Amino acid sequence: MASVPVMVTVKMRGVLTQIGELFTIALEGLRRTWDIRNWFWEFVEQCWFLARVTTLPVILIALPLGATVALQVGDLAGQLGAQSATGGAVVVGLVREVAPIAAALIIAGAGGSAMTSDMGARRIRDELSAMEVMAVNPVHRLVTPRMWAASLVSTMLSSLVILSGAIGGFFFNVLLQDVTPGAYFDGALGLLQISDLVVTLFKAWLFGLIAAMVACYKGMTCEQSPVGVGRAVNQATVVALLLVFGFNYVITTIYVIAYPPKI
């Protein structure tokens, strides 16, 4: 019986150690951000790669998502005699919650898994150790550009989700439910605040940073085998999404208390 508390203590110590290592790598990556000339081209390459693998999936997700929300909300609003408010509900929902979460899901799933496998392959081939032997910090050279690239692309994807979702909602709400275009956009503009857009872009930037941070950490600390890389990819996706949803809850709660939504 005495071994159970010991096992729990060991596991908790292991979890806390991993959390400490994760944030250590993240802070070390951000520490040399000012030295742009050493990681700029890697940053450009990662931005192009992430944009290439995430743009089409996020559009394909946002269009039907906006249309589905418009159909469901429009049907309910029609029963209440407030069908013209559908546009406001769709766009506000996209801006406040859906856009940063959708961008984070795509970044963590498509981009983060690729980052983890790339870093894991470098670890297996001992490239990371070779860089350290040559007095090149692998965190500054590899992690820093990936974190900033993921945060930038995530912010851009968030804007793309809002645009695509609004277009999908507009198509179904206006063409199928006979709401006028003016009523669709007036409802959205009447409920949105500038602070909503600012917080949404901040969340998208932060979530992209978290996804890249976790992906790089898991890849750099994986077991030195192909199986270890596969496990690291799976773990990176799960951990990144858990952190994203946790931070989203905290940020949204603080924002709603500071800036109550309009009625």
Image: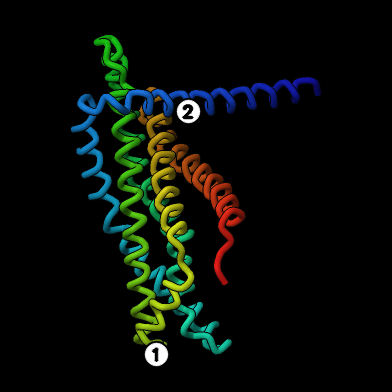
Residue at screen point 32% across, 64% down: 60
In front of the other: 98 or 257: 257
Label 1 secondary element: loop
Q: In which quadrant will I find the N terminus?
A: top right
Q: CA distance from mark 2 to mark 1?
A: 52 Å
The residue carrying pointer 2 sits among few (fewer than 14), some (14 to 19) or many (20 or more) residues within 10 Å by Cα, namely: some
Residue at screen point 37% across, 87% down: 180
Up-down relation of residue 185 to residue 202 (above or below):
below
Please state if 5 lies on the left or on the right of 40 as rendered: right
Q: Is residue 78 visible?
A: yes
Q: Is residue 228 visible?
A: no
Residue at screen point 51% across, 84% down: 75
According to the image, label 1 marks what residue?
178
Q: Which amino acid, mark 2?
A: Leu
- N-terminal of the pair, mark 2 or mark 1, is 2
- In the rendered image, residue 229, in percent from the top left (x then y), is placed at 38, 31
Label 2 secondary element: helix
In front of the other: 151 or 200: 200
- In the rendered image, residue 22, in percent from the top left (x then y), is placed at 47, 28
* Mark seen at residue 22: 2
Way the structure is coloured: rainbow
The residue carrying pointer 1 sits among few (fewer than 14), some (14 to 19) or many (20 or more) residues within 10 Å by Cα, namely: few
Mark 2 or 1, closer to the camera: 1
Q: Which amino acid, mark 1?
A: Asp
Dot 2 and dot 1 residues touching (CB under 8 Å): no
- In the rendered image, residue 216, in percent from the top left (x then y), is placed at 38, 31
